[in-house]
Amino acid sequence: MLITELLGVVFPQLLDVRIENVFTAGRSVRIQASTQDQDVACPACGFVARRVHSRYERRLSDLMVGGRETLVHLRVRRLFCGNQDCSRATFVEQVAGLTTKYGRRSIGWVACCAISRWRSAAGPARAWPLTSPPT
Ligand SMILES: [Zn+2]
């Protein structure tokens, strides 16, 4: 298995970003990444935006890696919508499978938390194991 295939299996949420650095800080794993400067459609009108307004760093809690909390430092772009008739002057690009508007936790982290809460609410029989036993 190639390292890129391994990364795709372990970190599918990071396939569409450029990973620039991975390091530990205390008990956490930090991943520095940026978007890949692809064309992005305005979420309001669908017009493909190419003009960059600014860039900034978002910090997202992501799924644990090796038992350590993981924080993604993701550099994203704010883009101008070039459509004169659109109500949105600018918008921030999102990464499919990773970010949501204003979200401070990755989509995977939120989904994992929701499953965990559901299992806890369902009672001890569903709390563990996370997968079905072999039949
Ligand atoms: Zn627009």
Image: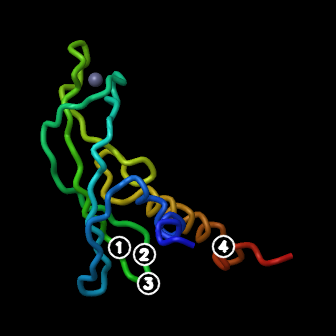
Q: Earlier in the sequence, mark 4 or mark 3?
A: 3
Task: Give the foreground label among 4 and 1.
Answer: 1
The answer to whether marks 1 and 2 mark residues whose Cβ atoms lie closer than 8 Å is yes
Q: In the rendered view, does 55 fall on the left or right side of 118?
A: left
Residue 105 locus on image (x, y percent): 35, 60
Residue at 31% x, 62% y is 60
Q: Residue furthest left?
A: 54
Amino acid at dot 3: Gly
Q: Marks 1 and 3, Cα distance to the nearest angstrom? A: 9 Å
Residue that carries the numbered disc 3 in the rendered image: 67
Q: Marks 1 and 2, Cα distance to the nearest angstrom? A: 5 Å
Above or below residue 33? Residue 40 is above
Residue at 50% x, 63% y is 8
Residue that carries the numbered disc 1 in the rendered image: 70
Amino acid at dot 2: Met
The answer to whether marks 3 and 2 mark residues whose Cβ atoms lie closer than 8 Å is yes
Residue 36 locus on image (x, y percent): 30, 49
The N terminus sits in image quarter: bottom right
Q: Marks 4 and 2, Cα distance to the nearest angstrom? A: 24 Å
Q: Quadrant of residue 9?
A: bottom right
Residue that carries the numbered disc 4 in the rendered image: 123
Q: Earlier in the sequence, mark 4 or mark 1?
A: 1
The answer to whether marks 1 and 3 mark residues whose Cβ atoms lie closer than 8 Å is no
Above or below residue 69? Residue 72 is above
Residue at 30% x, 86% y is 27
- What mark, if any, has residue 64 been given in the picture? 2
